[in-house]
């Protein structure tokens, strides 16, 4: 393994980024989780059980699909879609929640908590908990409950309790605060299934590892379908779990360009976007040192994105590291551009993408347009757009 | 020696315990913070803990969260707080310590933070989201400046780790009474007094207990095994009442509550 893929170190550092900036109350649980994860990695039966779940329950491997008509629209390189939207529960999130549910069982904990923005992680956690008979509480901001209603109903039907969060901006950041506070009081009996590659060590590593199946499959499928690696891989970045899982296996293949797409929102003014890697600076949020949107006093800034899953002021520390060493290029896509890509993919390929993934589709089309027809662009289509249909209709004043 | 070290040395000689109220800076404004701290000092507090409002506190319950939100509503900045405190904290008859998130310290710059906090009259800081693995650099800056950096031990901390934390802490050791967030509680864990006593026998540092403490009964139960008691939400909750009643009435109520809690301390016992 090269230096860049053997991170994080013992203290959870990816270069300068990462670490564990949490109250002492949580340290023992984080060490327990780190220890149990280490034992699970050394236990072949754990990997077998996880792989079997991904195969038979999630429906992996997800297809790598050549989007011919989208390629024509973009007018350049060939665009392939890694179809994480076809997973059980409709997004990549299930890869991580099943892995962490297995860890929960290994730690003999019976109760699970989670935070959710778009609701995809909430649904995936509720699903894994139903599958393993674990109690499940999901924290979700009131604003997100409004704009992602179908997922709220699914979580309830799967037996989870959805607790509305009314503090702060009532979105993902505040749901994460509440989940952490719950964990402070329940840490002896409860596992916190964090949904993105953020938070204190070892979460960024565990989430990345469980999501890396995306990138590993993609490499295999590229070999099978066109006998070489792609030229460019594009993924959206909120906290950054689908991007981490897609990029990580490609990191040492330096011929492959990697592009992460943050939420450009309405504009690049503070408060109008959710793009810490593009417009923020290093700071501490939710237990980790990473790029963050904060004011000059260290207070977390308001952020905005049309997509609830990207509407977050922080980002996983490994992305900050990849940015710092120049291995991954981070860029943004504005709300309107994402909506346009949503339409284009729907009409050209018959695929409704999640608004999160639409950010990656938009940038990928633009970059494909600048490349020749012999080149290959892979987009991580991290989730499906059913959950967004009502919100998109509302934004356009469409009659439903 | 920081002003906090001096306080506990004196209290030990006098065989007395510290009463340490916490309030949020700028709730609802800095002028009222000064009045409340002066009232708390008049009523026999030993040290005042002043919290810097933060947008995303992980260790705080609803009462203190709400106070942070109230304070931040007026766009309060750390530089405003330090500037204001410089006018009155140095002349207080009791020392002051700051509770602050590392998010703010990092952004402000650790060297500048320690220098300006000291100039504003603070004897040290408690940084609740900076566990010992991450604190070495700030601890060294604080040590060189004789500025205390208080570390926390909790009920989930294994004993050998608690001893390591005690070695890196300065000023005192903050023993968190419950696994959870700040806020008043009716009852405290039954083994709390034993755990505090165990640790206090093994460190030269004063051991002070906080989180959930709000009644004279709590103070009578814990005072014999510790060096000081920290009460926060019980005062912050009363400060919230300025929205519906007069400042004079709130000050009076806070003064009475503090006097009642101070009276529960043993006057001179081992």
Image (tube, helix red, strand yellow):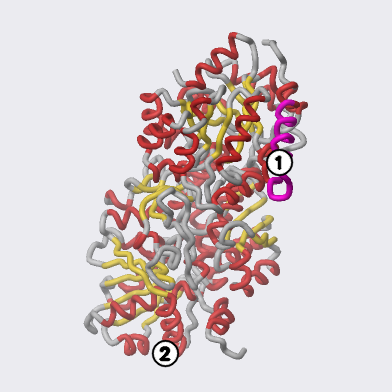
Q: Position of residue A170 (x, y in %)?
A: 59, 62
Point 60% across, 28% down: residue: B175
Seen in the picture, residue B268 relative to A331 is either above or below; the reply is above
Q: Position of residue A181 (x, y in %)?
A: 61, 47
Quadrant that contains the N terminus of chain B: top left
Q: Position of residue B234 (x, y in %)?
A: 70, 37
Quadrant that contains the C terminus of chain B: top right
Marks 1 & 2, CB-CB < 8 Å contact? no
Work out which residue is located at the far top of the displayed protein and give it: B13
- Let me know if residue A165 is in the magenta part: no
Tell me the magenta residue range: B241-259
Q: Is residue A62 visible?
A: no
Report crowding for label 1: few under 14, some 14 to 19, many 20 or more residues within 10 A (C-alpha): some
Q: Position of residue A314 (x, y in %)?
A: 44, 57
The residue beneath circle 2 is A348
Query: SS class of the residue under badge 2?
Result: helix
The residue beneath circle 1 is B238
- Of B247 and B48, nearer the camera is B247
Point 45% across, 81% down: residue: A339
């Amino acid at each position: 393994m090269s230096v860049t893929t053997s991170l994080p170190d013992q203290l959870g550092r990816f270069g300068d980024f990462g670490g564990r900036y949490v109250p002492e109350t949580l340290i023992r649980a984080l060490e327990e989780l780190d220890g149990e994860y280490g034992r699970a990695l050394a236990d072949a039966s754990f990997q077998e059980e996880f792989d079997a779940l991904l195969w038979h329950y999630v429906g992996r491997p997800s297809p790598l699909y050549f989007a011919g008509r989208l390629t024509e629209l973009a007018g350049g390189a060939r665009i392939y879609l890694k179809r994480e939207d076809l997973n059980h529960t409709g997004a990549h999130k299930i890869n991580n929640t099943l892995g962490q549910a297995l860890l929960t069982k290994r730690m003999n904990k019976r109760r699970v908590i989670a935070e959710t923005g778009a609701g995809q992680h909430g649904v995936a956690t509720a699903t894994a908990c139903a599958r393993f008979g674990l109690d499940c509480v999901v924290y979700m901001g009131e604003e997100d409950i409004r704009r992602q209603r179908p997922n709220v109903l699914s979580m309830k039907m799967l037996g989870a309790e959805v607790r509305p969060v009314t503090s702060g901006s009532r979105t993902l950041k505040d749901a994460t605060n509440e989940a952490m506070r719950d964990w402070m009081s329940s840490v002896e009996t409860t596992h916190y299934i964090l949904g993105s590659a953020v938070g204190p060590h070892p979460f960024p590593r565990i989430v990345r590892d469980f999501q890396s199946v995306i990138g590993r499959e993609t490499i295999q499928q590229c070999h099978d379908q066109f006998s070489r690696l792609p030229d460019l891989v594009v993924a959206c970045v909120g906290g950054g779990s689908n991007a981490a899982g897609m990029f990580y296996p490609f990191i040492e293949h330096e011929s492959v360009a990697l592009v992460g797409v943050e939420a450009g929102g309405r504009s690049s003014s503070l408060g109008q976007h959710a793009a810490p890697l593009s417009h923020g600076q290093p700071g501490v949020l939710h237990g980790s040192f990473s790029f963050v949107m904060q004011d000059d006093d260290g207070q977390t800034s308001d952020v905005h994105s049309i997509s609830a899953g990207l509407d977050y002021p922080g980002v996983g520390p490994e992305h900050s590291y990849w940015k710092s060493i120049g291995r991954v290029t981070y860029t943004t896509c504005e709300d309107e551009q994402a909506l346009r890509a949503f339409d284009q993919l729907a009409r050209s390929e018959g695929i409704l993408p999640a608004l999160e993934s639409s950010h990656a589709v938009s940038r990928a089309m633009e970059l494909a347009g600048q490349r020749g027809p012999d080149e290959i662009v892979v987009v991580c289509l991290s989730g499906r757009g059913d959950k967004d249909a009502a919100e998109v209709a509302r934004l356009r004043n469409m009659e439903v | 020696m920081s002003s906090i070290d001096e306080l506990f040395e004196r209290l030990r000689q006098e065989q007395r315990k510290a009463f340490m109220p916490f309030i949020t800076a700028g709730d609802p404004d800095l002028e009222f913070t000064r009045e409340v701290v002066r009232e708390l000092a008049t009523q026999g507090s030993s040290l005042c803990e002043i919290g810097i409002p933060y947008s995303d506190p992980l260790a705080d319950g609803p009462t203190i969260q709400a106070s942070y939100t109230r304070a931040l509503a007026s766009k309060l900045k750390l530089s405003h707080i330090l500037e204001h405190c410089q006018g009155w904290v140095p002349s207080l008859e009791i020392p002051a310590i700051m509770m602050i998130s590392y998010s703010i310290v990092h952004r402000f710059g650790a060297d500048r933070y320690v220098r300006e906090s000291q100039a504003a009259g603070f004897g040290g800081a408690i940084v609740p989201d900076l566990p010992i693995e991450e604190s070495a650099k700030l601890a060294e800056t604080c040590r060189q400046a004789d500025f205390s950096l208080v570390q926390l031990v909790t009920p989930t901390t294994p004993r050998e780790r608690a001893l390591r934390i005690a070695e890196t802490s300065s000023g005192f050791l903050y023993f968190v009474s419950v696994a959870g967030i700040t806020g008043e509680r009716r009852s405290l864990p039954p083994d709390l007094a034993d755990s505090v006593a165990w640790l206090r026998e093994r460190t030269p540092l004063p051991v002070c207990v906080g989180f959930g403490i709000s009644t004279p009964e709590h103070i009578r139960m814990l005072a014999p095994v510790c060096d000081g008691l920290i009460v926060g939400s019980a005062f912050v909750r009363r400060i919230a009442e300025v929205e519906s009643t007069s400042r004079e009435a709130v000050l009076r109520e806070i003064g009475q509550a503090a006097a009642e809690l101070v009276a529960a301390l043993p006057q001179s016992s081992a």
